[in-house]
Image: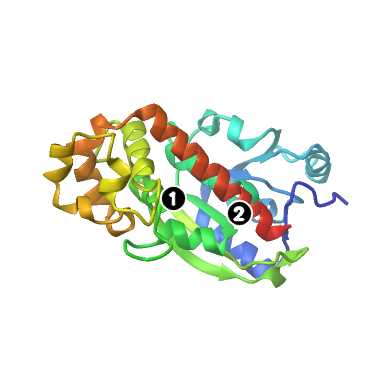
Protein backbone atom coordinates (compact mmCIF):
# COMPACT_ATOMS: atom_id res chain seq x y z
CA UNK A 1 0.00 0.00 0.00
CA UNK A 2 1.27 3.46 -0.90
CA UNK A 3 2.09 5.52 2.14
CA UNK A 4 1.25 9.11 3.06
CA UNK A 5 3.93 11.56 2.04
CA UNK A 6 4.28 15.25 1.21
CA UNK A 7 1.81 16.29 3.90
CA UNK A 8 -1.22 14.77 2.19
CA UNK A 9 -4.31 13.63 4.07
CA UNK A 10 -6.19 11.01 2.04
CA UNK A 11 -9.96 11.39 1.76
CA UNK A 12 -11.55 8.00 2.47
CA UNK A 13 -15.25 8.69 3.10
CA UNK A 14 -17.19 7.32 0.12
CA UNK A 15 -20.15 9.71 0.26
CA UNK A 16 -17.86 12.75 0.20
CA UNK A 17 -15.86 11.32 -2.70
CA UNK A 18 -19.09 10.72 -4.63
CA UNK A 19 -20.24 14.30 -4.00
CA UNK A 20 -16.94 15.72 -5.26
CA UNK A 21 -17.05 13.63 -8.44
CA UNK A 22 -20.67 14.64 -9.02
CA UNK A 23 -19.87 18.33 -8.48
CA UNK A 24 -16.97 18.15 -10.94
CA UNK A 25 -18.35 15.90 -13.68
CA UNK A 26 -22.09 15.87 -13.28
CA UNK A 27 -23.45 12.71 -14.86
CA UNK A 28 -20.74 12.71 -17.53
CA UNK A 29 -17.54 14.49 -18.54
CA UNK A 30 -15.34 13.92 -21.56
CA UNK A 31 -12.14 14.62 -19.61
CA UNK A 32 -11.26 15.00 -15.94
CA UNK A 33 -7.85 16.24 -14.80
CA UNK A 34 -7.10 15.22 -11.22
CA UNK A 35 -4.50 17.04 -9.14
CA UNK A 36 -2.87 14.89 -6.45
CA UNK A 37 -4.76 11.59 -6.82
CA UNK A 38 -2.97 9.98 -3.88
CA UNK A 39 -4.15 6.37 -3.60
CA UNK A 40 -6.87 6.84 -6.20
CA UNK A 41 -10.07 7.03 -4.14
CA UNK A 42 -11.35 10.03 -6.11
CA UNK A 43 -9.77 8.70 -9.31
CA UNK A 44 -12.08 5.69 -9.12
CA UNK A 45 -15.15 7.94 -8.91
CA UNK A 46 -13.95 10.15 -11.75
CA UNK A 47 -13.40 7.11 -13.99
CA UNK A 48 -17.04 6.17 -13.38
CA UNK A 49 -18.18 9.54 -14.75
CA UNK A 50 -15.56 10.58 -17.30
CA UNK A 51 -14.48 9.13 -20.63
CA UNK A 52 -10.86 9.89 -19.77
CA UNK A 53 -8.93 10.83 -16.62
CA UNK A 54 -5.47 12.40 -16.39
CA UNK A 55 -4.07 12.14 -12.86
CA UNK A 56 -1.06 14.33 -11.98
CA UNK A 57 0.92 13.03 -9.00
CA UNK A 58 4.27 14.22 -7.63
CA UNK A 59 5.04 11.26 -5.34
CA UNK A 60 6.87 8.56 -7.33
CA UNK A 61 5.70 5.80 -4.96
CA UNK A 62 2.08 6.79 -5.46
CA UNK A 63 2.57 6.98 -9.22
CA UNK A 64 3.84 3.39 -9.21
CA UNK A 65 0.92 2.32 -7.02
CA UNK A 66 -1.69 3.98 -9.27
CA UNK A 67 -0.23 2.56 -12.46
CA UNK A 68 -0.19 -0.92 -10.97
CA UNK A 69 -3.72 -0.60 -9.59
CA UNK A 70 -5.14 0.43 -12.97
CA UNK A 71 -2.86 -1.62 -15.18
CA UNK A 72 -4.58 -2.08 -18.54
CA UNK A 73 -7.06 0.82 -18.00
CA UNK A 74 -6.58 2.83 -21.19
CA UNK A 75 -8.87 5.64 -20.02
CA UNK A 76 -6.47 6.63 -17.22
CA UNK A 77 -3.16 8.43 -17.72
CA UNK A 78 -1.01 8.85 -14.60
CA UNK A 79 1.50 11.68 -15.00
CA UNK A 80 4.46 11.94 -12.61
CA UNK A 81 4.95 15.68 -12.24
CA UNK A 82 4.47 18.74 -10.08
CA UNK A 83 1.09 20.12 -11.12
CA UNK A 84 2.51 23.64 -10.89
CA UNK A 85 5.00 22.83 -13.66
CA UNK A 86 2.56 21.23 -16.08
CA UNK A 87 0.52 22.89 -18.83
CA UNK A 88 -2.89 21.40 -18.04
CA UNK A 89 -4.36 22.58 -21.33
CA UNK A 90 -2.21 20.07 -23.27
CA UNK A 91 -4.84 17.39 -22.65
CA UNK A 92 -7.71 19.52 -23.96
CA UNK A 93 -10.73 21.05 -22.29
CA UNK A 94 -12.07 19.21 -19.28
CA UNK A 95 -12.96 19.54 -15.62
CA UNK A 96 -10.32 19.75 -12.88
CA UNK A 97 -10.66 18.10 -9.49
CA UNK A 98 -8.49 17.29 -6.53
CA UNK A 99 -7.98 16.85 -2.83
CA UNK A 100 -5.20 19.41 -2.60
CA UNK A 101 -2.46 19.11 0.04
CA UNK A 102 -2.97 22.15 2.25
CA UNK A 103 0.51 23.58 1.86
CA UNK A 104 0.18 23.90 -1.91
CA UNK A 105 -3.54 24.65 -2.33
CA UNK A 106 -3.18 28.41 -2.79
CA UNK A 107 -0.48 28.20 -5.51
CA UNK A 108 -2.45 25.50 -7.34
CA UNK A 109 -5.64 27.57 -7.31
CA UNK A 110 -3.78 30.69 -8.46
CA UNK A 111 -2.21 28.61 -11.22
CA UNK A 112 -5.66 27.38 -12.22
CA UNK A 113 -7.43 30.75 -12.37
CA UNK A 114 -4.56 32.59 -14.06
CA UNK A 115 -3.34 29.80 -16.34
CA UNK A 116 -3.66 30.27 -20.10
CA UNK A 117 -6.95 28.80 -21.23
CA UNK A 118 -8.29 27.11 -18.04
CA UNK A 119 -9.46 23.58 -18.94
CA UNK A 120 -12.94 24.05 -17.48
CA UNK A 121 -14.62 24.24 -14.09
CA UNK A 122 -12.67 23.05 -11.08
CA UNK A 123 -13.76 21.36 -7.85
CA UNK A 124 -11.20 21.33 -5.05
CA UNK A 125 -11.16 19.97 -1.52
CA UNK A 126 -9.09 22.41 0.53
CA UNK A 127 -8.70 23.79 4.02
CA UNK A 128 -11.96 25.41 5.15
CA UNK A 129 -10.23 28.66 6.06
CA UNK A 130 -8.90 29.02 2.51
CA UNK A 131 -12.30 28.12 1.03
CA UNK A 132 -13.87 30.88 3.11
CA UNK A 133 -11.28 33.36 1.86
CA UNK A 134 -11.84 32.44 -1.77
CA UNK A 135 -15.61 32.87 -1.54
CA UNK A 136 -15.66 35.81 0.92
CA UNK A 137 -17.63 38.98 0.29
CA UNK A 138 -16.20 42.51 0.73
CA UNK A 139 -16.12 43.88 4.25
CA UNK A 140 -15.47 40.64 6.08
CA UNK A 141 -12.33 39.50 7.85
CA UNK A 142 -11.73 36.70 5.33
CA UNK A 143 -11.86 38.97 2.28
CA UNK A 144 -8.43 39.68 0.83
CA UNK A 145 -6.16 39.40 -2.18
CA UNK A 146 -7.00 35.71 -2.78
CA UNK A 147 -10.73 36.54 -2.76
CA UNK A 148 -10.34 39.23 -5.42
CA UNK A 149 -7.96 37.16 -7.54
CA UNK A 150 -10.28 34.14 -7.67
CA UNK A 151 -13.52 36.09 -8.06
CA UNK A 152 -12.06 38.24 -10.86
CA UNK A 153 -11.19 35.17 -12.96
CA UNK A 154 -13.97 32.79 -11.92
CA UNK A 155 -17.36 32.36 -10.31
CA UNK A 156 -16.69 30.89 -6.87
CA UNK A 157 -18.98 28.57 -4.91
CA UNK A 158 -18.60 27.16 -1.40
CA UNK A 159 -20.25 23.75 -1.78
CA UNK A 160 -19.95 21.97 1.57
CA UNK A 161 -17.76 21.41 4.61
CA UNK A 162 -15.82 18.23 5.41
CA UNK A 163 -14.75 17.21 8.91
CA UNK A 164 -11.38 15.70 9.87
CA UNK A 165 -12.91 12.24 10.32
CA UNK A 166 -13.35 11.86 6.55
CA UNK A 167 -9.55 11.64 6.11
CA UNK A 168 -6.78 9.20 6.88
CA UNK A 169 -4.85 10.40 8.78
CA UNK A 170 -7.25 13.06 10.11
CA UNK A 171 -5.97 16.64 9.72
CA UNK A 172 -6.11 19.09 12.61
CA UNK A 173 -8.43 21.46 10.75
CA UNK A 174 -11.76 21.37 8.92
CA UNK A 175 -11.89 21.21 5.14
CA UNK A 176 -14.35 22.34 2.47
CA UNK A 177 -15.18 21.74 -1.17
CA UNK A 178 -15.33 24.69 -3.56
CA UNK A 179 -16.20 24.99 -7.24
CA UNK A 180 -14.60 27.52 -9.59
CA UNK A 181 -16.13 28.26 -12.98
CA UNK A 182 -13.93 30.39 -15.28
CA UNK A 183 -15.52 33.59 -16.55
CA UNK A 184 -15.95 33.58 -20.31
CA UNK A 185 -15.24 37.32 -20.52
CA UNK A 186 -13.04 39.46 -18.27
CA UNK A 187 -13.53 43.20 -17.80
CA UNK A 188 -9.79 43.86 -18.32
CA UNK A 189 -7.21 42.56 -20.77
CA UNK A 190 -4.19 43.44 -18.60
CA UNK A 191 -4.79 40.73 -16.02
CA UNK A 192 -1.17 40.64 -14.82
CA UNK A 193 -1.24 44.36 -14.19
CA UNK A 194 -4.56 44.10 -12.38
CA UNK A 195 -3.47 41.34 -9.99
CA UNK A 196 -0.25 43.23 -9.28
CA UNK A 197 -2.29 46.35 -8.53
CA UNK A 198 -4.64 44.48 -6.19
CA UNK A 199 -1.68 42.99 -4.32
CA UNK A 200 -0.34 46.50 -3.74
CA UNK A 201 -3.72 47.60 -2.40
CA UNK A 202 -3.66 44.73 0.14
CA UNK A 203 0.03 45.15 1.00
CA UNK A 204 -0.85 46.27 4.54
CA UNK A 205 -4.43 45.16 4.93
CA UNK A 206 -5.36 47.34 7.91
CA UNK A 207 -4.17 50.53 6.21
CA UNK A 208 -6.17 52.62 3.76
CA UNK A 209 -5.74 52.44 0.02
CA UNK A 210 -4.14 55.88 0.16
CA UNK A 211 -1.41 54.60 2.48
CA UNK A 212 -0.78 51.48 0.39
CA UNK A 213 -0.67 53.37 -2.91
CA UNK A 214 1.25 56.44 -1.81
CA UNK A 215 4.51 56.64 -3.71
CA UNK A 216 3.04 54.58 -6.54
CA UNK A 217 0.51 57.12 -7.80
CA UNK A 218 0.45 60.89 -8.18
CA UNK A 219 -1.02 62.51 -5.03
CA UNK A 220 -3.50 64.62 -6.98
CA UNK A 221 -4.79 61.55 -8.80
CA UNK A 222 -5.13 59.66 -5.55
CA UNK A 223 -7.01 62.56 -4.01
CA UNK A 224 -9.48 62.54 -6.88
CA UNK A 225 -10.75 59.08 -6.01
CA UNK A 226 -13.43 59.04 -3.26
CA UNK A 227 -12.77 55.40 -2.34
CA UNK A 228 -9.10 56.04 -1.56
CA UNK A 229 -9.88 56.57 2.14
CA UNK A 230 -11.25 53.03 2.42
CA UNK A 231 -9.35 49.84 3.18
CA UNK A 232 -8.87 47.33 0.39
CA UNK A 233 -11.11 44.78 2.10
CA UNK A 234 -14.07 47.16 1.64
CA UNK A 235 -13.92 47.21 -2.17
CA UNK A 236 -15.75 44.76 -4.42
CA UNK A 237 -14.06 43.20 -7.44
CA UNK A 238 -15.95 45.61 -9.69
CA UNK A 239 -14.71 48.58 -7.66
CA UNK A 240 -11.12 47.30 -7.93
CA UNK A 241 -11.52 47.10 -11.70
CA UNK A 242 -12.76 50.70 -11.83
CA UNK A 243 -9.94 51.90 -9.57
CA UNK A 244 -7.34 50.05 -11.64
CA UNK A 245 -8.58 51.72 -14.81
CA UNK A 246 -8.00 55.08 -13.13
CA UNK A 247 -4.76 54.39 -11.24
CA UNK A 248 -3.28 51.01 -12.08
CA UNK A 249 -0.89 52.06 -14.82
CA UNK A 250 1.10 54.08 -12.28
CA UNK A 251 1.87 51.19 -9.91
CA UNK A 252 5.38 49.74 -10.04
CA UNK A 253 4.77 46.22 -11.45
CA UNK A 254 8.03 44.75 -10.10
CA UNK A 255 7.27 45.84 -6.55
CA UNK A 256 3.66 44.70 -6.83
CA UNK A 257 4.54 41.25 -8.11
CA UNK A 258 6.97 40.86 -5.24
CA UNK A 259 4.01 41.47 -2.95
CA UNK A 260 2.04 38.71 -4.69
CA UNK A 261 4.94 36.29 -4.13
CA UNK A 262 5.10 37.21 -0.44
CA UNK A 263 1.35 36.62 -0.04
CA UNK A 264 1.63 33.17 -1.61
CA UNK A 265 4.63 32.20 0.50
CA UNK A 266 2.96 33.37 3.72
CA UNK A 267 -0.27 31.50 2.97
CA UNK A 268 1.63 28.33 2.12
CA UNK A 269 3.50 28.49 5.41
CA UNK A 270 0.19 29.01 7.27
CA UNK A 271 -1.24 25.88 5.65
CA UNK A 272 1.92 23.89 6.44
CA UNK A 273 1.95 24.99 10.10
CA UNK A 274 -1.73 24.21 10.66
CA UNK A 275 -1.39 20.59 9.48
CA UNK A 276 2.00 19.68 10.93
**Residue where numbered disc 1 is placed:** 146
Is residue 11 positioned above or below 57 on the image?
below
Q: Nearer the viewer, residue 206 or 11?
A: 206
CA–CA distance in space, label 2 to label 1: 14 Å
Which mark is in front, 2 or 1? 2
Q: SS for tag 2?
A: helix
Residue placed farthest to the right in the image?
1
- Whether residue 31 appears in this view of the structure is no
Q: Nearer the viewer, residue 209 or 153?
A: 209
- Whether residue 168 appears in this view of the structure is yes
**Residue 222 x %, y %:** 18, 42
Residue at the image position 72 percent from the left and 38 percent from the top: 58
Q: Quadrant of the C terminus?
A: bottom right
**Residue where numbered disc 2 is placed:** 270
**Residue 158 x %, y %:** 46, 64
Is residue 217 positioned above or below 8 on the image?
above
Q: Earlier in the sequence, mark 2 or mark 1?
A: 1
Relative to residue 156, is residue 57 drawn left or right? Answer: right
Relative to residue 125, is residue 63 drawn left or right? Answer: right
> How packed is label 2: few (under 14 Cα within 10 Å), some, or many (20 or more)?
few
**Residue 216 x %, y %:** 28, 34
Residue at the image position 43 percent from the left and 62 percent from the top: 142
Residue at the image position 46 percent from the left and 33 percent from the top: 258
Relative to residue 72, is residue 103 drawn left or right? Answer: left
Amino acid sequence: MARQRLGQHFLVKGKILDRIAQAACGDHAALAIEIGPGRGALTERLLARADRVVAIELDAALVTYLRERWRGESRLEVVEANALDVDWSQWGRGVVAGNLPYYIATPIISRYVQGPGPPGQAVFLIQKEVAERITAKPGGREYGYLSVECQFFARTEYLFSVGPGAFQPPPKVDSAVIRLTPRTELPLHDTDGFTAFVSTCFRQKRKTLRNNLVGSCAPDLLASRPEISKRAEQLSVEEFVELYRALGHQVNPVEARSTIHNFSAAESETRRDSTS
